[in-house]
Image (cartoon, rainbow, N blue to C red):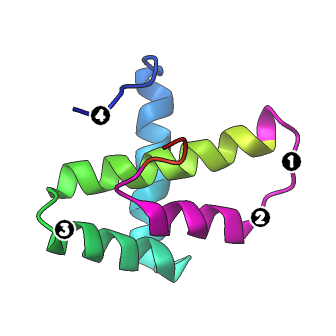
Amino acid sequence: MRKQASQASPQLTAAILEAVDNQLRDSNPPETKETYDRLVASGISDKEARRLIAVALSTEIFEVLKNKKDYKPQRYIASLRRLPNLPWD
């Protein structure tokens, strides 16, 4: 069982999942689709794969907004590559 983060607002969750869907649709960055395909091929459901990618994306957003760090595509891609291990694992 994975540790659940505190509950986000439904609107925020929907916005982040929409961003994940856009990344998958546009293959931008391509590592998002590669990660999705890898997770699904390993037996993770579509819904859970998207949720895991959303966790990586929201962690990057948090770094930028809360910790006032510059957006670093490499940091986000590194988080994607570590999935299904979460960024804080």
Density class for disc 4 (Cα within 10 Å; few <14, some 14-19, many ≥20) is: few
Marked residue nearer the N-terminal end (3 or 1): 3
Query: Could you tell me which residue is drawn at 39 percent across and 60 percent down?
Result: 21
In terms of depth relative to the viewer, which is nearer, 25 or 40? 40
Is disc 1 in contact with disc 4, using a CB cutoff of under 8 Å? no
Q: Secondary structure at mark 2?
A: loop
Q: Nearer the viewer, mark 2 or mark 4?
A: 4
Q: Which mark is residue 2?
A: 4
The Cα atoms of the two marked residues, 2 and 4, are separated by 26 Å
Q: Which residues are magenta?
A: 65-85
Q: Please check the rendered image and state whether residue 42 is part of the magenta-colored stretch, yes or no.
A: no
Tell me the crowding category of disc 2: few under 14, some 14 to 19, or many 20 or more residues within 10 angstroms, Cα based: few
The amino acid at mark 1 is: Lys
Residue under numbered circle 2: 72
Query: Is residue 77 toward the left or the right of residue 67 in the image?
Result: left
Residue 34's image quarter? bottom left
Q: Are marks 3 and 1 in contact (CB under 8 Å)?
A: no
Q: Label 1 belongs to which residue?
A: 69
Query: Eyeballing the image, is 68 above or below 77?
Result: above
Q: CA distance from mark 1 to mark 4?
A: 27 Å
Q: Are marks 3 and 4 in contact (CB under 8 Å)?
A: no
Is residue 66 part of the magenta span, yes or no?
A: yes
Q: Which residue is mark 3?
A: 40
Q: Amino acid at mark 2?
A: Lys
User: Image point 54% across, 41% down: which residue?
Assistant: 88
Residue projecting furthest to the front: 89
Q: Is residue 40 left or right of residue 18?
A: left
- Where 76 sits versus 33, above or below? above
